[in-house]
Amino acid sequence: MLRLEYFAEMRQDVPYAWRMLWRTPGFTVAAVLSLVLGIATSATVFSVVDAALFRPLPFEAPDRLMLLNITQQTPAAGEVRHRWSWRRFQLLERNVRSFETIASSSNNVVTLTGTDSPQPVAIEVVSPKYMTVMRAPFALGRGFETGTAAPAEVILGFDVWQHRFGGSADVIGRGISLNGVALTVVGVTGRGFAGVSGLAQAWIPAGMAPAVTYREYLTTNQNFITVVGRLQPDVTVEVARAELAVVGEQIQREEPSEADTPQDRFAATLLPLGSARVDVVTRRALLLLAGASAVLLLIACANVTSLLLGRAVMRRREIAVRLAIGAGRARLIRQLLIESAVLTAIAAVPSLVVATWMAAIVHMPATLARGSNFWGNIGEFATPAIDARVIGFVGAMCACTVLIVGLTPAMRATRRDLTVDLRSGVRETGGRLGLRDAVVAFQIAAAIVLLTGSGLLLTSYLRLRETPLGFDTARLLTFMIRPSEVQYPPQAAPALLDRVLEEIGRVPGVEAATLDGCTPLTVQCAIGALHIVGRPSAADAPVVRRHYVAPSHFETLRVPIVAGRGITPRDRAGTPLVVVVNEAAVRRFWPNENPIGRRIWFEGAPVIGSPDTSAEIVGVVGDVAYEPLDETPIRPDFFTPYAQFTYPSRMVMVRTQNAPELLAPQIAQAVRRANPDLAMFDVQSMEARAGLSWAKQSTQTTLFLGIAVIALGLAVAGVYSVTVFVVASRAREIGVRMALGSPARAIVATSIAQTARLGLVGLAIGLLGAVWLSGVLRASLYNTNPLTSGVYAGAIAVLLAALMLGTYVPVRRALSVNPVEVLRTE
């Protein structure tokens, strides 16, 4: 019976709450707008954080998928993780028992040939059981069969099947050509499946790799293959990890990996695939954004709480009458909470609309979503989206918001002295704003924390952008070509690259062109262990960057030659081996010496791989940032002529007279004239690549700054509402003082005294929070002291100016009213 009575009262309370909100449109709009800003921003940030950190991977039972790695325990670096060679993977596959099955995968980009327009296709080279481990859905056909020797088969991704083959059902059994090798289509994966890399458009069996991608794929000792496994249903992560430690030591005895020092110890381990995709730096940056959005939501709630407290004061006589005639306090509290619930429900729908729009325009850069993950090619799977998880989060936020914004005002509104409240007018309650003062002081404190944090991030980002890169990014087109390394082994690669550069050079508008294994501001450069002729060779030889470049390399990038000479067209196969070094190499290896004429070689290199085949240093060039600036961009670099040795897969950089994107079609035709089966991919201007290199800082700074600006606006709105109330409660006093001739300046000074007090209290608390936040931000800042005084001073100045504006406007409005009218009304 009580339950029926309760629901009957609820049916009355909701329409009553709606009518009360409808009667006060100014209050309702202000409160809903505050909630929309807080909820929509929090939902957007949650969608980003959830996608990158918490959302399950898009595979069946992803919690059972593990990433397996070789571990190398070193005296200097501790535990280092590596991938696998094919032979080590086979040993692993035969010896582990904790997994239903394991599989291998490695990324590559090949060219879909045999057509008028060659198309680059991202593929995964996989072991036969890969589709079983990943439980890949199939739209057509089947996976690879085990037990067959190197089947010439390929599985297509859903998008390639749709766009390249028109979604035709007869694609099964059709022949296609990848890197000039004929393969038969045996399956098409379901929509959305892109493998463990998150990038794959097709899959070929590892047995075909020696013909399609890499001749030594099955025999090389290099560890470049990612291994994933699916745990047995009754096996825990700890049990599997213990087994891997033993199996890894056994594999090292049978197929040893190369040790850096005699003390190195090798084993194996695992990590859940969902945890392996994100590193510590990425997690910290995203959680920092989540914290900032949570603070913003609290500021929005505080703003609405302040409005509700003011509204409760204005409704005190209504509430007192209802209490006097017998309404229970619990009943009134429930009624006021329902008003808060209706208010929040009104804000929920536009919040989701705004969050959906914001999530669509917030693009997670790969440098933020993906960690420096060199021990597994794992996709970020971090595209923000407003899905059921985000909607559930918004629902939970709304429920919490109702309690945060509604409970305190409701409790305070119903805790009144009936005699006083039935007799009082607004003016008798003037000045009793202790709780609202505290709410507004909190808003100011939180705003100064967010303003300071955004100021530090903005300063860091601007300093990052102002850092010299060592080369000219303007009018530089970059792209990759990936000829078949089977068709073009290193000895045949220089002739092909000669033709590519020659044809590109004939395109009108091209000033110069070069090639390398990487572009500046990336992390794909080759490395090698350096040995200097005439010096003792250490067991842990220093690792430096290696570049195989064209004679016009430094001219194309506009890098100055500091000493000696650059690389010339005469530096070809059959001529003395030469190398050019950068200034960082000179500072490290030849300080206060002239390096010209010194000789070096690289451990294990196919050319320049021994003291007898060493190369002579012939020049020194300026330093170029070959890695993102927030990592270690300037390191020793060693440049050798590609004509003396190179691999065929190269990044090409073309200096143009005008906008480089306009010449991309003509350059693509030139590349195909050099070889009809070549396709350009990863085509970007160098300026775009530079932007991507600092996109992590740009995205984080933009989001944090946006949150801080909204927080500032809400704090000012809170101050404005309090000032309006104070002015209203002192309307008679102001009218009397104006009628008696009191100067406006004195009235303004008196009126803003309370705001000044709130500002100082909030500022003091906020600065303590800002100092704490600066310590958290330290690891995210580039060349910026987290206690930079200018940032703090700027944040304080912005906040004080905004607060004064929020105070001055309502006070001036009060002063513009005729005092006679005010006194007559009172």
Image (cartoon, rainbow, N blue to C red):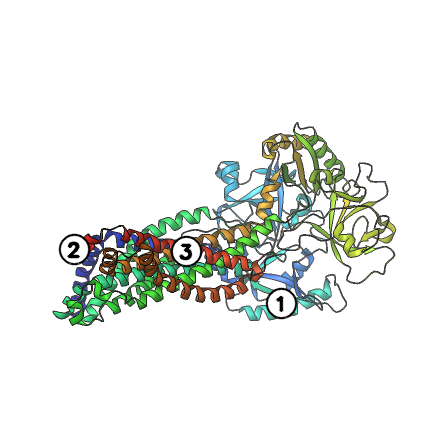
Please name the residue shown 65% across and 38% down the image. 180
Disc assigned to residue 182 = none
Q: Residues within 10 Å of mark 1 (few under 14, many from 20)?
A: many
Q: Nearer the viewer, residue 70 or 819?
A: 819
Instruction: From this view, report whether residue 4 is shown above or below residue 381.
Output: below
Q: Amino acid at mark 2?
A: Arg
Q: Residues within 10 Å of mark 3 (few under 14, many from 20)?
A: many
Say whether disc 2 or disc 3 marks the residue closer to the N-terminus: 3
Residue highlighted by disc 3: 712
Q: Nearer the viewer, residue 42 or 412?
A: 412
Say whether disc 2 or disc 1 marks the residue closer to the N-terminus: 1
Task: Determine if residue 359 is in view.
Answer: yes
Q: Quadrant of the C terminus?
A: bottom left
Q: Residues within 10 Å of mark 2 (few under 14, many from 20)?
A: few
Q: Secondary structure at mark 1?
A: helix
Image x and y of residue 553, in percent: 73, 40
Residue highlighted by disc 1: 244
Q: In the rendered image, which quarter is residue 70 located in?
A: bottom right
Q: Amino acid at mark 1?
A: Leu
Is 650 left, or right, of 365 in this rendering? right
Please name the residue shown 63% across and 58% down the image. 375
Is 72 left, or right, of 444 in this rendering? right
Image x and y of residue 811, in percent: 31, 55
Q: In the rendered image, which quarter is residue 99 located in?
A: bottom right
Disc assigned to residue 824 = 2
User: Gap between marks 2 and 3, in whole Å?
Assistant: 38 Å
Image x and y of residue 426, in percent: 21, 62
